[in-house]
Image (cartoon, rainbow, N blue to C red):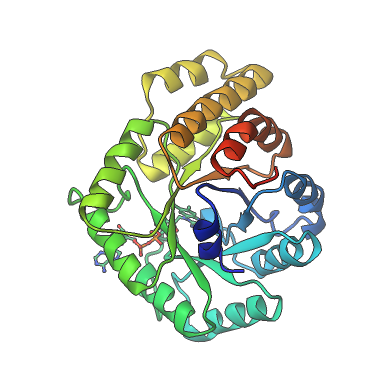
Amino acid sequence: MKIRELFKRSDLVYSFEIFPPKVDSPIEVVYDAIEELSSLNPDYISITYGAGGRVQDNRTAKLASVIKNKHNIESLAHLTCIGATEKSIDDILKELKENSVENILALRGDKPESGFGNSDFRNSQELIKYAKDNGGFGIAAAAYPQGHIETLVKDKDIDILKLKEEAGADYFITQLFYDNNRFYEFLNKVEQKGIKPPIQAGVMPVINKKQIMRTISLSGVTLPQKFLRIINKYEYDKIALRDAGIAYATEQIVDLISSGVRGIHLYTMNNPYIANSITNNIKSLIQSVNKERAI
Ligand code: FAD
């Protein structure tokens, strides 16, 4: 099923994101996590692709297939086009299609330190259009409530979002953010621009100060004082930081759902304990919004 159908059927779409294991680990190391995450009955699970400059391989497609065909949960395969040729993209799209994976998150990918190099695609809009025309995939694209790190002109990201919609994006998933007010300001601009596809809010619970600071430095996302106090206070107490991170993400999600957000995309970091805790905290809210949905 195309994920855009899920948005038509329900007022709130709830999904998880995982990443493939490092290339020197067997792919099976994430199977238990996938099993536990699937048992929480998300609407779909997405799988990152070559993130953080890691070697790109076909593990994303394999995991998307396991989620869809073994666990019967819709999957969303991330795909980046930086440094890609039409042939390399064709190979991946073919593998996804053969495994009944119907949805991709079409991305440009992070700029490598060595520069962009040769690529048949200049930006995500070209990949969105290509994947739509070559296989009829359902397409998600990225959105940046606090702006993309390379964007120097204020609100240019809203113009780019419109171009992604025109290229064929069915819906958007946002970069993580820790201040909901920034997200609401962004939604107002999206509405003023006449952008129609639903927007799913990306929420990343903090479990490790070093990791979150690295993500923040790469993305340019700002951190509210309330969040900074938590990571500074519990930086050396793993359990306390994890529990405070779960509480912070829960509070963020409660506010987002109460404000009528169309979807929550939880960056699980392959950690079923965190996904389980947050899902338990909010499942009555999801059910309240989507009366027919079991979770
Ligand atoms: P684009 O939409 O191509 O935008 C990139 C830059 O170019 C922006 O600054 C934009 O303003 C500018 N731009 C785009 N089009 C035009 C135009 N027509 N004219 C002028 N300027 C333009 N990365 C991975 O490597 N693997 C992953 O699995 C992954 N998953 C992600 C999941 C989510 C939900 C998000 C939000 C990001 C993810 N990323 C991932 C990171 C993403 O690849 C980077 O943020 C990347 O730098 C930009 O990708 P994009 O698709 O938004 O690019």
The image shows residue 126 at horizontal and vertical percentages of 37, 76
User: In the image, is 199 to the left or to the right of 16?
Assistant: left
Give the quadrant of ligand 1: bottom left
Q: Is residue 209 visible?
A: no
The image shows residue 30 at horizontal and vertical percentages of 76, 51
Q: What residue lies at 62% left-to-right and 83% top-to-bottom? A: 94
252 or 114, which lies in front? 252
Residue 20, by quadrant, is bottom right
Q: What residue lies at 50% left-to-right and 60% top-to-bottom? A: 8
Position above or below: 33 against 137: above
User: In the image, is 182 to the left or to the right of 246?
Assistant: left
Q: Is residue 103 visible?
A: yes
Position above or below: 109 against 87: above
- Image quadrant occupied by the N terminus: bottom right
The image shows residue 243 at horizontal and vertical percentages of 63, 21
- Image quadrant occupied by the C terminus: top right
Outermost top residue: 233
The image shows residue 181 at horizontal and vertical percentages of 33, 31
Residue 114, by quadrant, is bottom left
Residue 49, by quadrant, is bottom right
Outermost front residue: 291
For the image, the number of numbered tags is 0
Position above or below: 60 against 143: below
Q: What residue lies at 64% left-to-right and 79% top-to-bottom? A: 97
Q: What residue lies at 73% left-to-right and 43% top-to-bottom? A: 40
195 or 258, which lies in front? 258
Position above or below: 19 against 66: above
Outermost left residue: 153
